[in-house]
Image: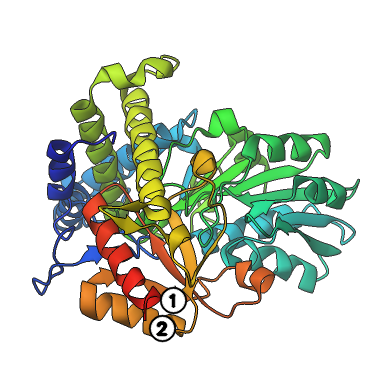
Amino acid sequence: MIFDQSLLDKIRAEFPRAARDASGRKRAFMDNGTGSLVVARAARAESAARVDCSANVGAIFRESKEAEATILEGRKAVADLLNAPSHNTIVSGESATSLLFSLSYALGREFTGHENVVTTDYEHYANVSPWIELERRGTISDVRFARLNKAEGTLDLDHFKNLIDGKTKVVTVTAASNVLGTKSPLHEVREIARAAAAYFVVDAVHHAPHGPIDVQAIDCDFLVFSGYKMFSSHGSFLYGKEDLLRRLKPYKVAPARDEPPYKWEWGTRNQSMFAAMGGVVDHLVWLADEIGSGYGKSLEAYSGRSRSLKIAMHAIEEYGRDLSRLILQGVDGLPGLLQMRHVGVYGLTDGNRLDERDPTFAFKVQGFPDQEVVEHIWNKYGVALRAEDFYSRVHRVYDATTMVRASLVHYNTAEEVGQLLKAIDELDRA
C-alpha cells in the first residue's frame, strides 16, 4: 500500500476521533460520505479564529484586521487546493446546496424559458433541485437526466450526448456519485458542454476528499465542494471563472461590493470556517512532506503549496484504490463483497477499473432489512455505516428505497476493512 503502517499511524494521530469516539468506544468510522471526521489542525485553527478574531471585518482594530487576514488566507488555501488561478475565484457559502441555488438563480436570469439543463441519474439532489426549480418557475423548459449503464453504475455518455441540443445552456454533473462511488468522465463531459456552448458545472462534494481537483485542467465554469465532507467544519466553497463571477448577477444586498467574490456572498463571512479549511490544507501539506517529494515526479507542472497538495491528494487517491480492492477481493482470509453469496454491490466492481471509482460502496444483504444490517455491523463489530437514500437519484435507477453505504477515506485501515467484511460475512452465512 502507498501508506505503510508507520505513516498510517501518523495520519490517524492527526484525527482525534479516528480510533475512538468521544465516549471512548473503539470503532471504525465509515460514514465519511455523510460527513468526515475533523482533522485536529482544522479544529485548532477554527477555535483560534473564533476566539482571537471574532470581530467583524472592516474596522481598524486588531480583531477585525485578523479576521480579514484569516478569510484571505483561507481563500488562498482553497485556491491552491483546487489549483484555481486566483483567490478571487473562491466564493464561500452555507452549503453546496445554497451555493448551487444561488448559481442557478444567477444563470437563470439569462434564460428565456426555452432553454434546458442536462445532468445525470446519479446526482445528489443538491445538484438537481436548483435546476428543477428553474423549470418549475418557467425559467427553463426542462431538466434532462442522462441514464446510467445500470449493470456497472457508469454514465451512459451516448445518451448524455443525445440529450444535448441547441437550447442546452447548462451541463452539470457530479465528479463522483455519493452512493456508487463512480467518477464522472469530466473531460469528456466538458467537451460535450463546450460543443453546445453551455455552462459546465461540477459538484465535487463527494469526490473532494478522495482525489486531486484541478479546476484549470477540468476547465469547468463552476465547481462546488463542502468543508465538512473534507475533514473540516460545515460550510462550502464555490469556484467560478472570474469573468463569469463578474458578469453574472446573483442575489445581492445593495451595499455589498460589486466585485467577486464578495458580490456572491450573503452576509458576514465566518472567518473560523476559512481558518478550518486552512487547517485541512496544512494537514495535506504535512502529508506530502511525510510522503516525500519523490512521489510527485509526474507533478512537475505544479509548484509550491499547490504541488504539495497534489502530491497528497494523488497519494490519498492511490490509497483509496488499495482499500477498494480489499473490500471487493477480501482481506486476511475473509472473502470480499463479490464473493459473498447474498451480498449485492451496486456500481463498478471490476478490480481493473478502480481508477474509475472512489472508495464508496453501496450494497444490500439479501434477506436482511438495510437498517438491521447497519445495526448488526455497529452493535457487534463497531463499524459505523448508514442506510438511507443519501439524497441521491440513484435509488430511482435501482428501485431501492434505501441502500447500505460504506465510504472510506485515508484514515481508514485494512484492519477496519476486515472488521466490515467479517460482519457482513457473518450475516451472509446466517
Query: Residue at horizontal 29%, vertical 33%?
Result: 2
Query: Residue at horizontal 16%, vertical 56%?
Result: 47
> Measured from the top left, where is residue 287 in percent x and y?
23, 34
> Measured from the top left, where is residue 108 in percent x and y?
74, 57
Residue 413 visible somewhere in the drawing: no
> Measured from the top left, where is residue 346 in percent x and y?
55, 62
Q: CA distance from mark 2 to mark 1?
A: 6 Å
**18 up-or-down from 397: above or below:** above
Q: Are marks 2 and 1 in contact (CB under 8 Å)?
A: yes
Q: 18 left or right of 233?
A: left
Q: Which residue is mark 2?
A: 371
Quarter of the image containing the C terminus? bottom left
Mark 2 crowdedness (10 Å alpha carbons): few <14, some 14-19, many ≥20: some
Residue sitting nearer the eye, 425 or 180: 425
Residue type at mark 2 is Gln
Query: Residue at horizontal 22%, vertical 54%?
Result: 415
Residue type at mark 1 is Ala
Q: Which residue is mark 1?
A: 387
**83 up-or-down from 103: above or below:** above
* Secondary structure category for the residue under label 2: helix
> Which of the two labelled residues, at mark 2 and mark 1, occupies the earlier sequence position?
2
Residue 272 visible somewhere in the drawing: yes
Residue sitting nearer the eye, 85 or 339: 339
Residue sitting nearer the eye, 66 or 4: 4
Q: 141 left or right of 295?
A: right
Q: How is the image coloured?
A: rainbow
Quarter of the image containing the N terminus? top left
Find the residue positioned furthest to the left.
24
**172 up-or-down from 191: above or below:** below
